[in-house]
Structures are given as C-alpha cells and as structure tokens.
Image (spheres, helix red, strand yellow):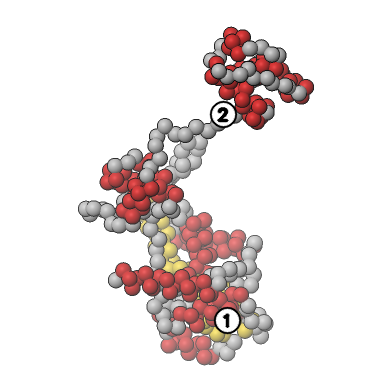
C-alpha cells in the first residue's frame, strides 16, 4: 500500500498556487493540479482530495509526486508521452533512402511521395519525414555543366585574383550581353494581389520585338554601364567597347572579364584590342560563365523588372531597362567574391569523378 504523501509548501509557492486557483482565467487543468497540492499541504487524505477535486487516486498521487520532483513549474506542463504509432524500423528507412536514389519504375523520371509510399507500403507522411531527415528532394533538379577546359585552374585563379585583389590604378569590368530580351505585352490586365489571392498574369502574350543589353559591371564600386542594341554581333560589341573607352577616365588600365562567346573573340575585336593598349581581356573557362560577376546583375534584372513586366512596345522595354540601370547606379554595392579557388577545384574534380563512374 502507498504511504500517505506529506507536502510542505513555502509561503511563496502557497501564494502562487492560491492566486492561480482564484483567477477565473486560469486553465482548469492547472487549477485542479494546484488544488491537489494545496489540499495535500493542508494534511487532507487522498480520499478527501479525490472528493474535493473529482479526480482519480492515480491522478492525485501523480501530481503530488510531480510537485515533489519539479516544484510549481512542474504542474504547468505535461510529460511527453510516446507516440501510439510505432517508430519505423531502421531497415525500412534505409530501404526508402536506397530506393529513392534509384530510378522509379515505368516511364516516370523521378519519385513522388505517393509513389514511394505505395512502393514501400508506408504512409506518404512517413516518406516525407524520411526525405526531409536525409535531405532528399527528388522533385527538384539543378542545372549543371562541368567545364572541360584544360586551362580551367589557371583561368579560375586569374579571374578570382581580379575579384579579390584588383590591380592598382586600374578598373576591373565584368562584361557580357543579355540577348533576346522580349518586349511582352499581356492580352489582358492582371488582377491585383489581395488577401488570400496572389496577383495574376495571363499565360498568353503579344510579342513586340526583342533587344540586347550590353552591360559592364564595375567590380570596385558596383556601378553598371549598360546599352541596349538591336543585335549582338561583333559590330555592336565594338561599339559598346568604344563607349566604355570614352566613359573610363584616361590613364587608367582596364581589365575585362568576359566569357568565350564567339563575338568576344572575333578577328575585328582582337584588332580593336591590339589598338588599345590599356585594355586586357581575361576569359572565363568554357562552360563557366557563372564566374562572370555581371551574370548576377542580369539575374536580378530579370527577377525584379523583366519577368513580370508588361511592355507595349520595344521602346517601352528599352526605357524600362534604362530606368532600372539609373536606379541601380544611385545605390551601387561593390562586388565581393567569397569562394575559395581550391574549394571550387575540389568540387569540379568530384563532379568529373562522379560522371566517370556513371558513364
């Protein structure tokens, strides 16, 4: 038989519990727990406490013991209880992970939660928890192409060196062109955003022509020199280089980072470069245009201005791009490179090793 429980309450605990019982806004489960402790401190027996609170003997004993273990704070929270659903066996979890890394049956290209649940014989929620725990996202895919340039390491160090430690008395420019920017007009106005509904945009459009944006990002201060042109041949590229030549202060050396697009290596472009001694071209490795800092500016331009834009004419599109450039140049931010070349080279080596094992 269980011995009678003897509780001693300090004045602080008694006042705290009494205030909780008297408060009409207190949760009822906290009220009867406090009553059990107060009545126990007043030397009432278990049967009397059961009559006063309307609780079973096991509940009275449980909260008497909880107060002795954890004090007043222990009365406010319940202990965590094990789930009624048994945990999945480790072998079953490993089977889900291994099966996810294999192609699905039939003509499907990737696994879905419900397909995997039906394959293994567990609930979709369990599959989702396993995927989250192991960082698996079969519904997503990233675009990736590894560079096969034999001089990848040398070009990488050359470009990163300009970002991290630019030469003194020189301007470092990241140059590229964003071609085939479409002036798209929608067939109907979109509905505005409101609570519970996103803004809308029609799926069809009217195309009013295209333009090409030539841009040069100044690494040191983040400003951008931009110019819209109809085409992106070597003639337009030389015209853009002449504009930069006029805009950059005389006497400063100009180091240009650009990709391996054929326009950038045209014989007439090389001849122009030979006539301008202060210019030096630094080419990124093949299939590695992500090294070109201006690509980040193009991505931001697309997200912030072009993707949801409505342009009634080609002139309207070019004016919007020019306004965005002017707004950007009012608050430019210097470009900061944070990647370590050796870490990049290690990732590229691992990627090539993986491709060799697959193929």
Q: Secondary structure at mark 1?
A: strand
State the image quarter where residue 285 is shown. bottom left
State the image quarter where residue 351 is shown. bottom left
Q: Position of residue 8 (x, y in %)?
A: 72, 21
User: Is 272 in front, or is 206?
Assistant: 272
In what quadrant of the picture does the N terminus appear? top right
Of the numbered discs in the image, which one, if any, rests on residue 316?
none
User: Is 264 in front, or is 64?
Assistant: 64
Q: Position of residue 327 (x, y in %)?
A: 60, 60
Q: Position of residue 196 (x, y in %)?
A: 48, 36
Q: Earlier in the sequence, mark 2 or mark 1?
A: 2
User: Is 295 in front, or is 33?
Assistant: 33
Q: Position of residue 145 (x, y in %)?
A: 39, 70
Asked whether the viewer can see residue 30, the reply is no
User: Is 213 in front, or is 311?
Assistant: 213
Residue at the image position 50 percent from the left and 83 percent from the top: 154
Residue at the image position 60 percent from the left and 13 percent from the top: 46
Residue at the image position 40 percent from the left and 40 percent from the top: 87
Q: How many marks?
A: 2
Q: Secondary structure at mark 2?
A: loop
In the picture shown, does residue 8 fall above or below 141? Answer: above
Q: Can you name the residue that lies furthest to the right here?
A: 11
In the picture shown, does residue 267 fall above or below 131? Answer: below
Of the numbered discs in the image, which one, if any, rests on residue 78?
2
Residue at the image position 50 percent from the left and 64 percent from the top: 298
Mark toward the viewer: 2 or 1: 2
What residue does disc 1 label?
255
Left or right, 126 with respect to 251, comes to left
In what quadrant of the picture does the C terminus appear? bottom left
């Amino acid at each position: 038989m269980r011995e009678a429980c003897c509780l001693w309450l300090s004045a602080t605990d008694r006042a705290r519990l009494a205030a909780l019982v008297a408060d009409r806004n207190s949760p009822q489960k906290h009220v009867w727990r406090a009553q059990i402790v107060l009545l126990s401190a007043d030397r009432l027996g278990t049967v009397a406490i059961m009559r006063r609170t309307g609780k079973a003997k096991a509940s009275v004993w449980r909260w008497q013991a909880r107060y002795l273990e954890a004090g007043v704070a222990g009365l406010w929270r319940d202990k965590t209880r094990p789930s009624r659903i048994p945990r999945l066996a480790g072998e079953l979890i490993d089977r889900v992970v291994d099966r996810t890394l294999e192609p699905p049956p039939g003509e499907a290209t990737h696994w879905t939660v419900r397909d995997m649940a039906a394959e293994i014989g567990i609930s979709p929620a369990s599959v989702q928890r396993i995927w989250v725990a192991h960082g698996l996202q079969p519904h997503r895919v990233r675009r990736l192409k590894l560079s096969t340039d034999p001089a990848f390491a040398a070009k990488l160090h050359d470009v990163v060196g300009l970002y991290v430690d630019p030469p003194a008395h020189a301007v470092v420019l990241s140059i590229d062109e964003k071609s085939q920017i479409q002036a798209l007009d929608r067939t109907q106005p979109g509905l505005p955003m409101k609570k519970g509904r996103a803004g809308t945009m029609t799926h069809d459009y009217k195309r009013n022509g295209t333009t090409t944006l030539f841009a040069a990002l100044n690494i040191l201060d983040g400003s951008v020199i931009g110019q819209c042109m109809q085409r992106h041949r070597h003639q337009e590229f030389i015209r853009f280089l002449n504009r930069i030549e006029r805009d950059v202060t005389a006497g400063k050396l100009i180091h240009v980072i650009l990709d391996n697009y054929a326009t950038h290596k045209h014989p007439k472009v090389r001849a122009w470069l030979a006539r301008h001694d202060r210019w030096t071209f630094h080419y990124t490795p093949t299939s590695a245009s992500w090294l070109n800092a201006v690509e980040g500016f193009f991505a931001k331009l697309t997200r912030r201005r072009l993707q949801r834009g409505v342009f009634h004419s080609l002139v309207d599109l070019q004016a919007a791009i020019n306004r965005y450039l002017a707004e950007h140049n009012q608050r430019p931010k210097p470009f900061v490179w944070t990647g370590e070349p050796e870490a990049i080279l290690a990732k590229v080596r691992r990627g090539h090793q993986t491709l060799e094992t697959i193929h």
